[in-house]
Image (cartoon, rainbow, N blue to C red):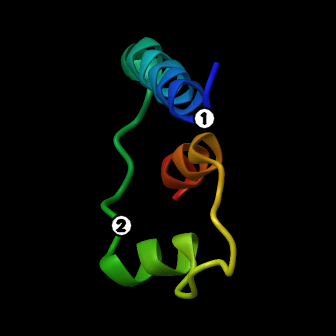
Amino acid sequence: MDARERALRQAHGHALGWLAALPDRQVPHPRLGDEIVRALGADLPEDPSAPADVVDLLVTA
């Protein structure tokens, strides 16, 4: 399995988890752009990141 396929499987898993939690989840307050930038980090990494790691970072942010 290559890095792209791992990232797609990772994103699919997060999407399924999100859908499964809908009935019990409270609606969070919307995040502002500054909060998202802080969560993602303003600086780009020196080296490439694994696509699946980027998916996890975006889900967390």
Q: Residue at x 52, y 24 (%)?
A: 5
Q: Residue under circle 1?
A: 3
Q: Position of residue 35 (x, y in %)?
A: 45, 77
In this view, the residue in front, 59 or 29, is: 59
Q: Position of residue 17 (x, y in %)?
A: 51, 19
Q: Which mark is residue 18?
A: none
Please tell me whether mark 1 or mark 2 is closer to you in this view: 1
In the image, is residue 56 above or below residue 38? above
Q: Is residue 8 left or right of residue 10?
A: left
In the image, is residue 56 above or below residue 42? above
Label 1 neighbour load within 10 Å: few <14, some 14-19, many 20+: few
Q: Residue at x 30, y 61 (%)?
A: 30
Q: What secondary structure is found at the residue carrying circle 2?
A: loop
**Residue type at tag 2:** Arg
In the image, is residue 41 above or below residue 24? below
Alpha carbons under labels 1 and 2: distance apart = 30 Å
Q: Residue at x 52, y 86 (%)?
A: 42
Q: Is residue 55 left or right of residue 1?
A: left
Q: Position of residue 47 (x, y in %)?
A: 69, 72
Name the quarter where the N terminus is drawn. top right
Q: What secondary structure is found at the residue carrying circle 1?
A: helix
Q: Is residue 18 left or right of residue 56?
A: left
Q: Residue under circle 2?
A: 31
**Residue type at tag 1:** Ala
Find out whether the residues at labels 1 and 2 contact each other: C-beta distance under 8 Å.
Answer: no
